Image: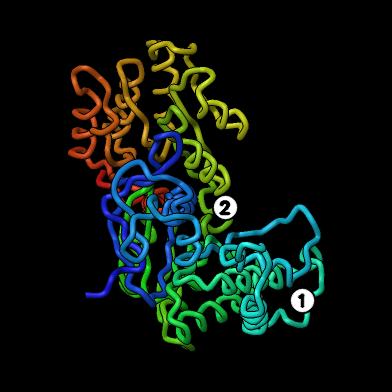
């Protein structure tokens, strides 16, 4: 049985003992071209740093070609893995050749000078990545694509068995991004170099990778071939937007096309929506509703709450209560008056405690008047009332025809269809 190029066994990693990803387990066979995808903040870059051993993981075990990364001496680590970052900046105007030669640092002898064999390896790397003609040019003067090819040449001169790429094409135009990926593909196919690449471009990942790891909120959501990982339902859940997934008519790979993030212009015009929010849970909903030209109201919120600040910035009518105070009878009546004129009520993923649980009564009153109510799923997990009042109210709302939503994309689909039970 061959040893995996990279193995994560129940690994949690992060910064200052605060995990960014938790309990990850997977292994990558030697010679694989694997992509790591997922939304911002899901743990992709942290995973790459942990894989190199530069960021000690909190728990679990990481192995590079069968050896614990934390026990590998720096020279042996450099022989096994090289890293292509998003960008490489240098304090001095080193030439392209000097940058590429840095890849041989781990192989320098006692004299600290490159041998004839080292020079041959450096030149070979420059030829392979097509930077030989610019070998004397200062690195800072290069275009984005030229810089990335130079960095790949440096990593290639390192002669690692595995290359980790951290969004290495994110700052490149489509031509240079494809050029870099074609070089990487050649390295993988012709030299058997294992590639693990982080990418925000789902189509590039689908086109070039044999396998994809999809992360969300530090958890491995899916692992497999692109066609199995990139499903419309899964991407909608992870990225919180609608997408279409279909075969690429040219290459046959999976192609992901986002549908318009915002509804068509004036799609909400003439529709009044009241939002029950708090603690920042309504920021995106309020912003999206406003951009789509809905007539929006909000409350009851405490003054100074981040959602109240968002509402104020957008000019949204808001019923406010004093800071750190429970919702008063006066504020509730003011909000109830507004709800009577609403054509829909949206309950955001708000934490409910004794001070604001009464806001759910606004949604219950709305259902009594046959006003559609859209309830963010998972109220039970956000219920901090001593008598589980919020959980009970949520159950009553669903019994009375309120519809649950998981993502903002789900919410807008429901709003546009107005599919409620009166």
Report which quarter residue 275 is drawn in: top left
Looking at the image, which residue sits at the far front? 110
Residue designated by label 1:
135
Q: Which x, y percent locates residue 21? A: 37, 46
Quadrant assignment, res 281? top left
* Residue that appears at 51% across and 44% down: 289
Query: Residue at left 23%, top 35%?
Result: 397
Tell us which disc is closer to us: 1 or 2: 1
Height in image: 144 above or below 249?
above
**Residue 231 in sight here:** no
Left/right of residue 293 with respect to residue 147 in the rendered view: left
Q: Residue at x 25, y 26 (%)?
A: 390
x and y, in percent, of residue 147 in the image: 70, 68
Left/right placement of residue 342 relative to residue 29 reads: right
Q: Is residue 139 visible?
A: yes
In this rendering, the count of numbered labels is 2
Q: Secondary structure at mark 1?
A: loop
* 421 and 392: which is toward the camera: 392
**Taking 185 as reference, is 377 above or below it?**
above
Residue nearer the viewer, 357 or 43:
43
What's the residue at 18%, 39% (across, down)? 399
Classed neighbour count for the residue bearing mark 1: other residues with Cα under 10 Å, few (<14), some (14–19), many (≥20): some
Give residue 266's mark.
Answer: 2
Foreground residue, 368 or 291?
291
Q: Secondary structure at mark 2?
A: loop
Q: Which mark is residue 402?
A: none
Compared to residue 194, the image places residue 297 above or below, namely: above
Q: Earlier in the sequence, mark 1 or mark 2?
A: 1
Q: Is residue 187 above or below residue 105?
A: below
In this view, the residue in front, 295 or 403, is: 403
């Amino acid at each position: 049985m061959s040893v995996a190029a990279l193995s994560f066994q129940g690994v949690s990693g992060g910064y200052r003992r605060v995990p960014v990803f938790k309990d990850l387990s997977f292994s990558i066979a030697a010679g694989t071209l694997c992509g790591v995808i997922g939304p911002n903040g899901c743990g992709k870059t942290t995973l790459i740093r942990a894989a190199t051993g530069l960021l000690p993981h909190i728990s679990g075990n990481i192995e590079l070609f069968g050896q614990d990364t934390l026990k590998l001496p720096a020279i042996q680590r450099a022989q096994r893995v090289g890293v292509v970052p998003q960008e490489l900046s240098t304090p001095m105007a080193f030439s392209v050749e000097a940058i590429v030669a840095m890849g041989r640092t781990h192989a320098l002898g006692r004299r600290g000078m490159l041998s004839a064999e080292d020079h041959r390896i450096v030149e070979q790397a420059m030829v392979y990545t097509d930077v030989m003609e610019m070998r004397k040019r200062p690195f800072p003067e290069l275009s984005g694509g030229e810089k990335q090819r130079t960095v790949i040449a440096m990593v290639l001169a390192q002669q690692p068995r595995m290359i980790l790429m951290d969004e290495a094409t994110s700052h490149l135009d489509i031509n240079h991004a494809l050029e870099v990926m074609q070089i990487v593909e050649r390295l993988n196919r012709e030299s058997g170099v294992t590639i693990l690449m982080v990418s925000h471009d789902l189509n590039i990942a689908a086109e070039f990778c044999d396998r994809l790891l999809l992360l969300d909120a530090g958890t491995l959501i899916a692992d497999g071939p692109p066609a199995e990982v990139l499903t419309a339902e899964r991407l909608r859940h992870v990225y919180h937007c609608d997408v279409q997934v279909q075969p690429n008519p040219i290459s046959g790979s999976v192609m992901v096309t986002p549908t318009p993030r915002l509804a068509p212009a004036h799609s909400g015009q003439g529709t009044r929506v009241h939002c029950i929010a708090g603690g920042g849970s309504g920021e995106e909903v309020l912003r999206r509703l406003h951009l789509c030209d809905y007539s929006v109201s909000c409350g009851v919120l405490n003054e100074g709450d981040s959602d109240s600040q968002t509402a104020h910035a957008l000019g949204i009518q808001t019923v406010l209560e004093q800071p750190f105070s429970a919702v008063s009878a006066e504020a509730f009546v003011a909000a109830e008056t507004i709800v009577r004129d609403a054509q829909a009520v949206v309950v955001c993923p708000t934490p409910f405690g004794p001070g604001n649980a009464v806001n759910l009564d606004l949604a219950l009153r709305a259902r009594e008047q046959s006003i559609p109510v859209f309830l963010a799923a998972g109220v039970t997990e956000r219920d901090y009332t001593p008598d589980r009042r919020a959980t009970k109210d949520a159950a009553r709302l669903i019994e009375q025809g309120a519809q649950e939503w998981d993502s903002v994309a789900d919410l807008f689909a429901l709003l546009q269809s107005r599919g409620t039970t009166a």
